[in-house]
Amino acid sequence: MKLSLLDRSRTRAGRPEAEGLTGSIDRAINAERLGYDRFWVAEHHAVPGIASGSPPVLLAAIGARTERIRLGSGGVMLPHHQPLVVAEQFLMLEALHPGRVDLGLGRSLGFTAPVREALRDQAPDTFEDDLRDLRAYLDGAAAVTARPQAAGRVPMYVLATGRGTVIAARLGLPAVIGGPILVEPRLVEVLEAYRKDFQPSPGVERPYVVVSLDVTVADDDATARKLALPEAWAMARSRQTGEFPPLESVDDIRRQTWTTQVRDRVESSLDRAVAGSPQTVRRALERLAERTGADELLASTSTYDRDALFASDEALRDLVN
C-alpha cells in the first residue's frame, strides 16, 4: 500500500490556534523526510479544535516548504463552494507545485446548525453534478476556461460518505473510505460494488481505494492507547456538548469527571482506532489490507504530544514499506 497522512491542524488547549497551522507545516516537512507518498489536509469551519478551514491556503504554505511529497485535500467540502472557484484554486496550486497536487472532495456539511446556516447550506444535493462540472473546469473542457491552465492533470478523489462509492464508481474516480463504515459488516459489499461498477475515466483506468483511519504507534499498546486518548476524549465531549474541542493533555483529561456515557464513548473510539506497538499495528493493518484490498492507507493520527506524533509517524513509515 501507498502510505499517506491526513492532518487536521488540531489545536491544543492553552496554546495559540495558529500553532495548529504551523504544526501541520512542520509535520508535512517531516513526512517528506520520512518518505510518505502524500500529505492530506482537511476543511472544517468554526470548530475550536481545528485551525484550518481552507485546504488550498494551507497546501500552498506546505508546498512552499516541501519539494517532493504530494499535496492533497482530504477534503474540500464541495457543497460549500462553486466548482469554478475550486478549480481555480487547485489549478493555481498545480501551477505553483507541478505534478504534486491532488484534490479530494467531500460533501459533509457544517458541524452545528449555526455553522450550516453561516455556510448557507440550504441548496439541494448537487454533489455528483458539481463533481462533473469541476472535472470539466480542471480539464479545460467547460464553456468557461478556468485559469491558469496547467500542463498536468489534477487528480480528483471522492470522500465516500453516504452514496459516495456509487458516485465515485459512476464517474471513474478513486474512493476514500473512512469513519463508521470501516467497522460495518457491509464494507466488503460496498467495496465489491464499487470495483464491479467502476467506469474508467481519463487518467483513472481502474478502481482505487484509499482507507482512512486513526493509527497511533508507540513502544507498547498501553502507551499508544494513552497517546490516542485526547482525540477519543474530544470526540466523546463533542457528542455531549455539540462542540469539538482542542486536544487536552492526558493528565488534564484524567483529572476531570467522567460520566458513564463519556467513558463508554471514549472506550468505543479507542477500540475502533488502530493504536499499539509496532507488532500490534502491523497485524491490524494486515487484516485491514486483506479485508479491503486498499491501494493506500491514509493515517489520520492526532496526539496532544507533538513529539510523540512525529515518533508515531516515523514508526508507521517503518512498518509500511
Image: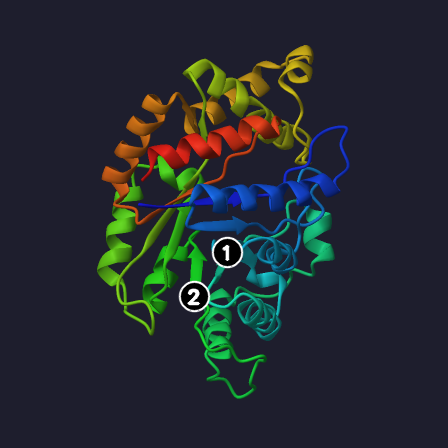
Depth check: 305 or 254 in front?
A: 305
Give the vertical position of 132 relative to 22 (above or below): below
On-image quarter of the C terminus: top left
Distance from disc 2 to disc 1, alpha carbons, whole Å, reads: 9 Å
How many numbered markers are drawn? 2
71 displayed left or right of 238: left
Give the label on residue 134, or none: none
Mark 2 touching mark 1, by CB under 8 A?
A: no
**SS at circle 2:** loop
Give the vertical position of 83 relative to 112 (above or below): below
Q: Earlier in the sequence, mark 2 or mark 1?
A: 1
Residue 120 image offset from top left, x and y in percent: 69, 61
Depth check: 40 or 257 in front?
A: 40
Please report the residue visible at 56 percent of the width from the left and 86 percent of the height from the top.
Answer: 144
Residue 172 image offset from top left, x and y in percent: 33, 67
On-image quarter of the N terminus: top left
Render colour scheme: rainbow
Give the vertical position of 20 relative to 97 (above or below): above
Neighbours of disc 2 within 10 Å: few (<14), some (14-19), many (20+): some
Residue 262 image offset from top left, x and y in percent: 59, 20
Please report the residue visible at 68 percent of the width from the left and 40 percent of the height from the top.
Answer: 20
User: Which residue position is annotated with label 2?
Assistant: 155
User: Which residue position is annotated with label 1?
Assistant: 72
17 displayed left or right of 126: right
Residue 46 image offset from top left, x and y in percent: 72, 47
Q: Amino acid at mark 2?
A: Pro
**SS at circle 1:** strand
Q: Amino acid at mark 1?
A: Gly
Neighbours of disc 1 within 10 Å: few (<14), some (14-19), many (20+): many
